[in-house]
Amino acid sequence: MSQYDEGHTVAGWTGTVIATIGSAVLGAGVCMVSSALIAGGLGITAASVLVTWTLHLAGWGKPPGVRPRGQWRMGARDLTARAGHAECWACRLAGRGRRTAEVAVVAPEVGQPEPAAAEAGR
């Protein structure tokens, strides 16, 4: 038995199976010179990305890095997925994960010159 978590998750395996089917359909389309099969294969492959991403965000994936041994089994659900993973680009694309401090823009009061205009007038 391996000492390391290999990241086998429901999201990962589901996406892999769908992508394999899409690649097979795409390959058949190329061999048969069928634009319908090529388009279908590309669509299935694109769907695999969206399905994997959705499952990851639902907690069936894993965060980057090593998980505790108790979470190594295939069906382990990641309960921290709702908040997002700090170094996960998929979570960031969904608006989750590492947050940066927001910059507040303060508008000048009505009738007051803007700060840049006031500096230019001096």
Image: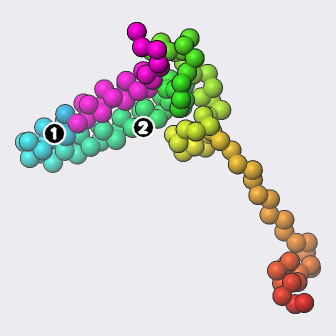
- For the N terminus, which image quadrant? top left
Residue at 65% over, 32% down? 83
**Residues rendered magenta in the picture:** 1-23
The kind of residue tagged 2 is Leu
Q: Which residue is mark 2?
A: 50
- For the C terminus, which image quadrant? bottom right
Question: Which label belongs to residue 27?
Answer: 1
Q: Mark 2 falls on what kind of element? A: helix
- Residue 45: quarter of image: top left
Residue at 25% over, 35% down? 22
User: How far apart are labels 1 and 2 at the CA level?
Assistant: 21 Å
Q: Mark 1 falls on what kind of element? A: helix
- Residue 36: quarter of image: top left
Seen as rendered, the residue at the extreme bottom is 121
Residue 32 x %, y %: 7, 42
- Is 18 within the magenta? yes
The residue closer to the viewer here, 26 or 75, is: 75
Q: Main secondary structure of the magenta part?
A: helix
Residue 38 x %, y %: 19, 44
